[in-house]
């Protein structure tokens, strides 16, 4: 899965950018107060994308 597609999916489900790191971008789902890190690679494994969505309690893409 492309990183930009995952970020669009997260932002459409109330997740906001919390901070930028050198290797990860940290997103937070404010209504449920959950945090997860999104790697800064252009492509990522679909299993990792599902895990990030589960951590943030949003539907899987």
Image (cartoon, rainbow, N blue to C red):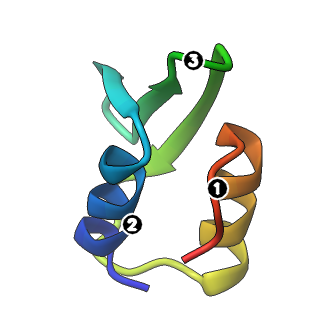
Q: Which quadrant of the view contains residue 9?
A: bottom left
| Element marked by disc 1 | helix
Label 1 CA crowd tier, 10 Å (few <14, some 14–19, many 20+): some
32 lies above or below 10: above
The residue that label 2 is drawn on is 6
CA distance separating discs 1 and 3: 14 Å
First in sequence: mark 1 vs mark 2: 2
Circles 1 and 3, Cβ within 8 Å, touching? The answer is: no
Percent across and percent down for residue 21 are 34, 26
Q: Is residue 46 above or below residue 51?
A: below
Quarter of the figure with residue 45: bottom right
Percent coordinates x, y for residue 58 in the rendering: 63, 51
Q: Please, is residue 11 above or below residue 16 in the view?
A: below
Name the mark on residue 53: 1
**Mark 3 highlights which residue?**
31
Q: Which badge, 1 or 3, is on the more N-terminal residue?
A: 3
| Front residue (pair 20, 36) | 36
Mark 2, other Cα within 10 Å: few <14 / some 14–19 / many ≥20: many
SS for dot 3 = loop
Residue drawn at 53 percent across, 27 percent down: 29
> Does dot 2 land on a helix, a strand or a loop?
helix
**For discs 2 and 3, the disc positioned in front in the rendered view:** 3
Q: Tell me the quarter of the picture where residue 14 sits.
A: top left
Query: Position of 52 compared to 61: left or right?
Result: right
Q: Tell me which label, 2 or 3, sits earlier in the chain.
A: 2
Residue drawn at the location 69% of the way across and 69% of the way down: 50
Check residue 42 in the rendering and tell me which mark sits there, or answer none. none
Could you say where residue 61 lies in the image, as x and y percent from the top left?
A: 54, 77
């Amino acid at each position: 899965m492309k990183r930009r597609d995952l970020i669009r999916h997260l932002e459409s489900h109330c997740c906001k950018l919390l901070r930028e790191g050198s290797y990860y971008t940290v997103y937070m789902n404010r209504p449920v107060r959950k945090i997860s890190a999104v790697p800064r690679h252009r492509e990522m494994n679909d299993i990792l994308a599902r895990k990030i969505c589960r951590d943030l309690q949003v539907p899987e893409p």
